[in-house]
Image: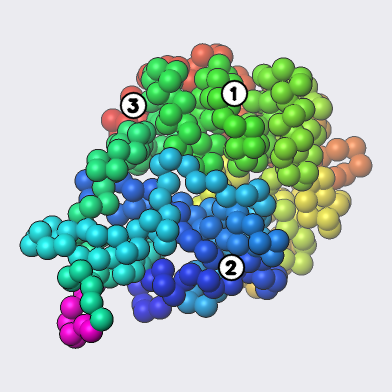
Amino acid sequence: MAGGAPRVFISHLAGVAVFDPHGDQVGRVRDLVVMLRVGGRPPHVLGLVVEVVSRHRIFVPMTRVTGVESGQVITTGVMNMRRFEQRPTETLVIGELLDRRVRQVETGEEVTVLDVSVTQLPGRRDWEIDKVFVRRGRGGALRRRGETLTVEWSAVTGFSVEEEGQGAANLLATFEQLRPADLANVLHHLSAKRRAEVAAALDDDRLADVLEELPDDDRVEILGKLQEERAADVLEAMDPDDAADLLSELPETDKERLLGLMRPHDAASVRRLMSYEESTAGGIMTTEPIVLRPDATVAVALARVRDPDLTPAHAAQVYVCRPPDQTPTGTYLGVVHFQRLLRDPPFTLVGAIVDSDLQPLPPDAPLPVLAGYLATYNLVAAPVVDEAGHLLGAVTVDDVLDHMLPEDWRESEVPRAWGAAHAG
């Protein structure tokens, strides 16, 4: 690809191999899933339809894609192997957009779509369609040169959601730039029917983010209206502590059924959190902090904290442990704070700069102790370690605040109104 934002035409992407981070092939790209948007805005790329070895097709979100090039697609390796089912607000690029007759906005001339290109937005993991390769005329055996051209997406019409009537898509487009907390506030004030429509149209990751910000009644209602397999997918996309809180609101039979549909690793993390008292370190911690071995370098640590999917609190420090790297880990050695990472050379080993002075929290530490610990040491996150010295997770200041504020604090208009007024 040329310099600047990565761009690739779908004709070059169709059929290419999809690899995991270890270089093992997991399947081939068969289509691209997008969501059309109002006002001639370029469609948002949701993910890839990948045909795996067993010949069935799965959906791989673009948030799980780390590299798209002519000839290969690299993923994080974390995939849901359930069969892909297209939703009403989703459009398949190869299956529905190519060979479509559309019109040029400037001339009104009818053209045929031969190809489209997708580009990654600068500094983000989001992708969108930006160019359309079209052919003038209605076809014929012989073509004169110059009858094909590449135009901006906005230069042609015939794709828009107004014409397609895609239900909740218009509303989604209106609120697309909202933060999850603000979109949650919008959903809270919709009718139950409209709330269910919008929730059904959101992709799994976006819906997971929004559910984490909703009052308990709303998120239980939304989860209950999803198909069970999709509900399990959304729970997997949520932070484990939030998924555990949501599942704890469900009847025991529903809770066990959804846990059984989740991937074993994700279900195990949620079950572990649900085994602790709700208002303790073990009950509100995340089981997915940044864990590094002592022989990792500062450069590796900085790469991990740059992950745009991490909250500032989660990215504030890395936890140094002996293997295994997944919680519960091997022996916990200490933390390295973000500011220390910025002060040391990239080749420095994190084991050489670890802070082992602060005593970690036990999983049964109650909420007042957690708040006092964070306030005393001016921290936004703290490690939770069991009696055997294994890191179980990390408590963050936002989770502590969630549990200390009044139960109805999410329904208050004041924080969101202030935030909207001071945004940008």
Q: Nearer the viewer, mark 2 or mark 3?
A: 2
Q: In which quarter of the view is residue 134 placed?
A: bottom left
Residue at point 70% right, 71% down? 24
Q: State yes or no: residue 149 in magenta.
A: yes
User: Seen in the image, is 28 located left or right of residue 100?
Assistant: right
Question: Mark 2 highlights which residue?
Answer: 28
Where disc 3 sits, the SS reads helix
State the extent of the magenta-drawn residues as a range: 142-150
Image x and y of residue 154, in percent: 21, 57
Q: Are marks 3 and 1 in contact (CB under 8 Å)?
A: no
Q: CA distance from mark 2 to mark 1?
A: 34 Å
Can residue 352 be seen here? The reply is: no
Q: Which quadrant would the C terminus be assigned to in this image?
A: top left
User: Seen in the image, is 254 located left or right of residue 112?
Assistant: right
Pick the front one: 280 or 37: 37
Image x and y of residue 193, in percent: 43, 20
Kind of residue at badge 3 = Trp
Pick the front one: 356 or 398: 398
Chief secondary structure of the magenta portion: loop
Image x and y of residue 54, in percent: 70, 61
